[in-house]
Image (cartoon, rainbow, N blue to C red):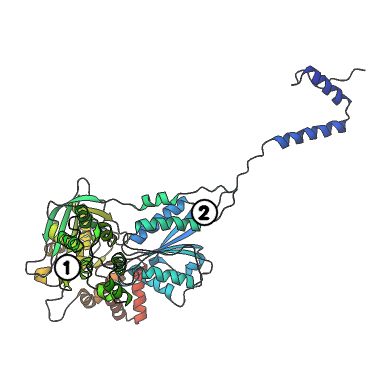
Amino acid sequence: MTALALLPQTAPFKDDDRLSLDRVLGAASPIQRAWLAGFLAGIDAGQAPLPRVDAPARAAEPLTILFASESGNAERLAQDIAKLARKGGFKPKIIDFADLDIADLPKQSRLVVIAATWGEGEPPSRATRAYADLMGASAPRLEGLTFAVLALGDTAYAEFCAVGKAIDARLAELGASRAVERIDCDLDFESPAATWIKSTLEAFTPAQDAADNVVSVDFSSRAGVEISRDPVAAEVIEHVNLNSSRSDKETIHLAFGFDGAAPAYEPGDSLELFPENDPALVDAVLAATGLSREESLRSRLLNERDITTLSIKTLETFAAETGHRELRKLLDEEQARAWIEGRQLIDLVEAFPAALTADQLTALTRPLPPRAYSIASSRKEVGDEAHLLIAAVRYEAHGRKRGGVASTFVADRLKSGATARVRLKPNKHFRLPEPSTDIIMIGPGTGVAPFRAFVQERRAIGAKGRSWLFFGDRHYTHDFLYQLEWQDALKDGSLTRIDLAFSRDTPNKVYVQHRLWEQRRDLIEWLENGAQLYVCGDAKAMAKDVRAAIVAAYADVKALSPEAAEQAVSELERGRRYHQDVY
């Protein structure tokens, strides 16, 4: 009997192989055929490539970035960190210290703090409330929090980076864990900050198993790009001293023109001016150190290095380089801090004579920083120009006449037709409200600069809201800055009212805070009806006195306790209706 052919002639086998398979399969029982089918399927499955199963994407890790800023540097760094963190797989959230609720801190897992120190070891004005809460006895425990602190400061002040140091210590005291060591940055913070950002984000990145597909981000190569900003050239097209010839002050109205469009500034923004040092002072420093013939060094000291600031760090460096015994003794006996008061680099190199190399002298200095000035114009009125208001700082200390680096550069050497380098510094926390909103502007002296921009802007757009200016200076006759402009603004309605305080015109000195108290009923009525309040000028005394006057006004007009009046002003601040741009 001939066996049944099971494989067709079209099967992919040679004839002999096909006949052999037919003989085997034809004689096999159904069970044997089923086993063989399963066996062959198993072999195929074992030799086939495994199907790809992608690991689930890792959820973005939360990262809270908290900043306390006065001049805007800490806020800008917070934004830089957020950009890089987002590229590295984090989900960053930026919080202004002014908006921080301390009770929310225990809910955070990773925290980066960028904190500036203001004045003599104080927090930035908008951070005062939350900073006090953090330092207070009722601050919550933070055992579940990992943190890192970047402190900004100025070695010219005794309490260098005091606020950042205090926050760093306080977070650890409350039980939080430090991810990386705190860094304390001087005015030339950009390079060390970029390095710190890289290491901090790497420290916060969770450890991954080898099988995880994690994209690595080169933080170091990106950080410098994010932080850098370039100045532009501007020509002085107007240079006018607004004080009379009989005034003991010198306040320069400076108008800049640009080769093309002006920087895209808004009322409330500042312009950073890159100054040059006094050539006579540069020459005195070079002569005292035996380097008068170093022309390239002279150029650097004129344009790039800070030759006025004196700090303990400078003294330490000088003592180490020269081995000067008298200076070493001053440092060891902790008398250096008192000696520095009112002195500059020229005093150091003359009091402790020593020949220096160009590199040694350069090491005693730091980069010459720009100075920021509130812009005193609106582009809607002046077009492609930007105006500044700068008071020349001149004084005498330790038998030597001194001057502010930038202000005397402007007053003495930056004349019409000259060119300077400037850079826009936005300030989104000092912006005008809706045109229908009333505004109260308090700006004695050069603090009036941004309010000139405010009035110009509101005139140009036909704002319906009322505007009230408090201005003060020394003498009505000699120091009434922009007097004619304010009078014209009152006539055309772009300024509703003005209250003046000239401190030297009466037996008892009168300041803007006194005028606030005198007009307290109208002041509170404006605020109760939604007006926004702006303060610009001196931070050490004026801004504090103005705030105290407003608290007192609330207490008197609304019959509130001191605590309730303080709470009322705090609510203005938290509601972004009390704005400060102080220096």
Above or below for 568 versus 68: below
- The answer for how far apart the CA atoms under marks 1 and 2 are is 55 Å
Q: Is residue 190 visible?
A: yes
Pointer 1 local density, CA inside 10 Å: few below 14, some 14–19, many at least 20:
some
At horizontal 67% and vertical 39% (from top left) the residue drawn is 50
Secondary structure category for the residue under label 2: loop
Which of disc 2 and disc 1 is earlier in sequence?
Answer: 2
Kind of residue indicated by mark 2? Ala
Q: Position of residue 227 (x, y in %)?
A: 35, 53
> x%, y% of residue 255?
16, 55
Q: Quadrant of residue 5?
A: top right
Q: Are marks 1 and 2 in contact (CB under 8 Å)?
A: no
Residue 402 tag number: 1
Residue occupied by mark 2: 60
| Snapshot quadrant of residue 307 | bottom left
Front residue of 39/527: it is 39
- Residue 66 occupies quadrant: bottom left
| Front position among marks 1 and 2 | 1
Q: Residues within 10 Å of mark 2 (few under 14, many from 20)?
A: few
The secondary element bearing badge 1 is classed as strand
Left or right side of 413 for 157: right
Label placed on residue 52: none
The quarter of the image holding the N terminus is: top right
